[in-house]
Image (tube, helix red, strand yellow):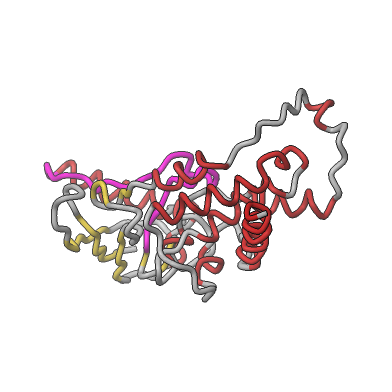
Amino acid sequence: MKLTLRVWRQQNSDADGAMSTYEVDGISADMSFLEMLDTLNEELIVKGEDPVAFDHDCREGICGACSLVINGDAHGPERTTTCQLHMRSFEDGDTIDVEPWRAAAFPVIKDLVVDRSAFDRIIQSGGYISAPTGSAPEAHATPVPKPDADFAFEHAECIGCGACVAACPNGSAMLFTSAKVNHLNVLPQGAPERETRVLDMVTQMDAEGFGGCTLTGECATACPKGIPLPSIAAMNKEWLRATRKARR
């Protein structure tokens, strides 16, 4: 395939950015999107030009490092991570716009790389447990009802990629924060911090400058792991419970 790429280039967080146009040829439909960008970068390096900076790590849809807005959609036209998006989702001759996550809380570091350490600080504020669970046999000594286990596992699938923030018109991190709160709050080992966890994590989320949630659903649609929109309502219920208890 021969493609025209319009890629966001920005030297650093203080510099102005702009879209730059590149032509790439000989792209296989079986390439991943990141492999296509690798091809572009190889050509730029040969020409003595600065390669395009973009985040990646496992390239297996697990780590959450890859983070691109492709033709206006977080992670592109398929419901998957950017590294698992393949070029067969595009047509020969297509023009593809490639941009970084757009959110006030995710400042651009360079080109397509953004600083997502705001997520780390939200997790640090409450995404932990203090209960000693021991080894695996000891942990299994406390039965967890299957609905609770399924609920926790569903939310544990969040890989923190930030697609929910990038897709939200307000740049809200409610779906991410809900996943991290719900994952632990429903489990026995999460009980000691149940109230403080939700209060601290929501407070930290607000402090990071994320936008407000309007429950329009773009966040859940963009999530490559399928974290559902009702998880926000579940966290709100936890927050109300913790707030009322704190006021007693």
Read off the magenta span.
47-69
Q: Residue 129 at what x, y percent from top left?
A: 65, 35
- Vertical arrangement, residue 174 with respect to residue 121, above or below: below
Tell whether position 179 is magenta.
no
- Vertical arrangement, residue 175 with respect to residue 125, above or below: below
Tag count in the figure? Answer: 0
Among all residues in the image, which is located at the extreme front?
248
- Vertical arrangement, residue 73 with respect to residue 118, above or below: below
**Principal SS element in the magenta part?**
loop
* Quarter of the figure with the N terminus: bottom left
Residue 62 lies in quadrant:
top right
For the residue pair 117 and 245, the one nearer the viewer reads as: 245
Tell whether position 58 is magenta.
yes
For the residue pair 47 and 56, the one nearer the viewer reads as: 56
Judged left or right of residue 51, residue 114 is right
For the residue pair 82 and 127, the one nearer the viewer reads as: 127
Q: Residue 99 at what x, y percent from top left?
A: 30, 61
Judged left or right of residue 133, residue 39 is left
* Quarter of the figure with the C terminus: bottom right
Write the residue at 40% across / 52% down. Answer: 207
